[in-house]
Amino acid sequence: MQMAADLFFFDADSLRRLAEAHQDEFARGQPFPHAVFDDFLPAGVAARVLEEFPAPDEIAWDVYRDRGNTEKLATTRPALIPSFTRHVLAEFNSAAIMEFLETLTGMTGLTPDPYFLGGGLHQIEPGGFLNVHADFNVHPRLKLDRRLNLLLYVNREWRDEWGGHLELWTADPKRCARRVAPLFNRCVVFATTDRALHGHPTPLKCPTGQTRKSLAFYYYSNGRPENEQSPTHTTLYGDAATERPPRTWRQRAKPFVPPIVLDTARRLVR
């Protein structure tokens, strides 16, 4: 890792070695491929992100409720994010991170999301939660398939009894297979499919004035393995998260046809 003047840059060689060391962990992760990295950022970088992290009443956060399935704050608006943290967010969309993720996962053709749709800064206050779900599978603007989530937690001295653990669930039968505490500078990378169920459904029990803070990043590709394909959908909760509807013609053609051609064909069909 390198810092120049007031900026921070990922070191591609260091990330490549880290990815190679965790390839087996990711591939064998249960209930779906994932890996956990502690002390992911240089300590000073993570500390500064935490220092800058806006309090719930400090900026105009977007409030997510999603039909009663969550209670959290989030923002992707650059004007509301402190400058150093904005630079760190940009580094998570850099070539060094893309090579790290491709080496770690074996996926190819990954691309970041310049809009940070659904990602960016997340914050959950006492009583907040996120029901177990499968994520939306296609970016509505880029028309690309969502393949990976990367979460970075910035919570110092987090106590286990407060909860807020990231829960990874099996799809059939539905049960929690792993709980990951949201500890300071801990990074979690996991594959995103219709059967990659996750969340933290138990309301947060941290004391007043304490919140669960994280940075969220999602990565995409044009097409995905056939056994992961399904019609475009938004976030799926409850029984809807384990249903496997048949693939559409667009899903079948996507790995072989540029997005602009598919969009044109879809408009003509309509």
Image: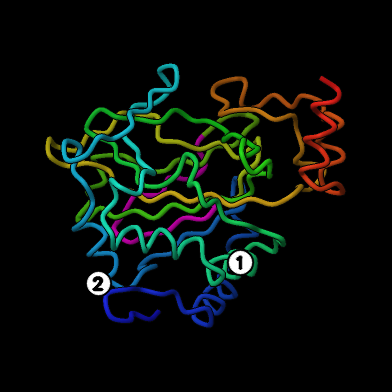
The quarter of the rendered structure image containing the C terminus is top right
Vertical relation: 108 (above or below) 153: below
Question: As shown in the figure, which amino acid type bears the numbered disc 1?
Answer: Leu
SS of the residue at dot 2?
helix
**Quadrant housing residue 234:** top right
Q: Residue 20 in the image: state x and y as whole percent.
A: 60, 75
Question: As shown in the figure, which amino acid type bears the numbered disc 2?
Answer: Gly
- Residue sitting at 65 percent across and 35 percent down? 194
Q: In this rendering, would 250 be left or right of 234? A: right
Q: Residue 233 in the image: state x and y as whole percent.
A: 65, 28
- Magenta residues, start to end: 176-190
Q: CA distance from mark 1 to mark 2?
A: 25 Å
Q: Nearer the viewer, residue 236 or 144?
A: 144
**Magenta run includes residue 179:** yes
SS of the residue at dot 1?
helix
**Magenta run includes residue 237:** no
Residue 151's mark? none
User: What's the magenta bit mostly, secondary-structure-wise?
Assistant: strand
Vertical relation: 43 (above or below) 222: below
Of the two numbered discs 1 and 2 on the same chain, state the one appearing first in sequence: 2
Q: In this rendering, would 153 be left or right of 143? A: left
Q: Which residue is mark 2?
A: 44
- Residue sitting at 76 percent across and 47 percent down? 223
The quarter of the rendered structure image containing the N terminus is bottom left
Q: Which circle, 1 or 2, is nearer the viewer?
A: 2
Dot 1, crowdedness within 10 Å: few (<14), some or many (≥20)?
many
- Residue sitting at 33 percent across and 28 percent down? 63
Q: Which residue is mark 1?
A: 104
Dot 2, crowdedness within 10 Å: few (<14), some or many (≥20)?
few
Q: Residue 213 in the image: state x and y as whole percent.
A: 29, 47
